[in-house]
Each structure stands twice: as C-alpha cells, then as structure tokens.
Image (cartoon, rainbow, N blue to C red):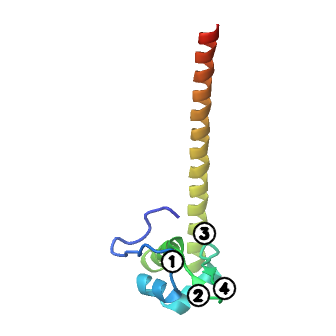
Amino acid sequence: MENNIQPKNVQIPDKLFFTIREVSDISGVKSYILRYWEKQFKFLKPVRSIGGQRAYRKKDIEMVLLIQRLLYNEGFTIEGAKKKLKDIKKTEVQIEINFKELELADTLDKIKKKLRDLKMTIG
C-alpha cells in the first residue's frame, strides 16, 4: 500500500527483507501478535525463506503499521479492520484503473493528433 500509513516517528530501514524480530522492534508489536495477524489478515503475507523463516518486505511492515493503527489507535475490531483494509484495497485498485484509463485517453489523443498532422502533410 502506497498510502502514507506509517507514523512519522517510525523509520523503516532501507533493505529488502526483515526478520520477524526486526519487524517487532520497528513496530513495537510482539512476534506472537504478528504471527496471529498473519492468520487474520490476508493482506499480511511475508514470504518464507528456504529454511521456512519469515521474510517481511517493506510493504509488509507498512501493513503491520496500518493494522496496528486501525486496532490500537482507531479502535477497530479485527473484523472491522479487515473490512477497512478491503475498502482501502478496493479504493487503490479503482484509483489505479482510473489512472490507466487516463493514460490510455492521453495516448489516444496523441495518436489522433499525429494522424491529423500526418493527414495535413499528405493531403
């Protein structure tokens, strides 16, 4: 999620993967709660290493911080937070679709202009 969802005082280091311990240290959420959230929230799915260890990416940490905010700061229940995340995801998808439609419309306008210019130079 590309929302500005992390609190201003949380800095996520610039690296590819994080252990569950590192995520716990960054977010302040205990490891066992992170494991529970993985079962509850389908959007929180860290990859697994060959040895089976969780490998969180930056987007996973951002999701942890968003879940944390929804549950602890905004007072959502687990079910309420799931619904909110689903709504956020739908909104992001719609924005992406709208952006792609705008890009397509812009491209079509450019093609039309080029065709008009070509017609004028030929005809």
Q: Position of residue 114 (x, y in %)?
A: 59, 22
**Real-space CA distance between mark 1 and mark 3, rounded to the nearest whole angstrom:** 15 Å
Q: Residues within 10 Å of mark 1 (few under 14, many from 20)?
A: many
Kind of element beneath mark 1: helix
x 41%, y 75%: residue: 12
Residue that mark 1 sits on: 64
Q: Residue at x 50, y 72 (%)?
A: 58
**Label 3 – label 2 distance at C-alpha:** 20 Å
Q: Residues within 10 Å of mark 4 (few under 14, many from 20)?
A: few
Could you say which is closer to the camera, residue 77 or residue 26?
Answer: 26
> Mark 1 touching mark 3, by CB under 8 A?
no
User: How much space separates mark 3 and mark 4, taking CA atoms?
Assistant: 33 Å
Name the kind of residue labelled 1 in the image: Val
- The residue tagged 2 is 35
Amino acid, disc 2:
Arg
Q: On screen, 35 above or below 6? A: below
Q: Which mark is residue 83?
A: 3
User: How far is mark 2 from mark 4, CA to CA?
Assistant: 18 Å
Q: Considering the numbered disc 3 on the image, is that residue within a helix, a strand or a loop?
A: helix
Q: Give coordinates of residue 48: x percent, y percent.
A: 64, 82
**Of marks 3 and 2, the one in the foreground:** 2
Residue type, numbered disc 4: Ile
Amino acid type, label 3? Lys
Dot 4 lies on which element?
Answer: loop
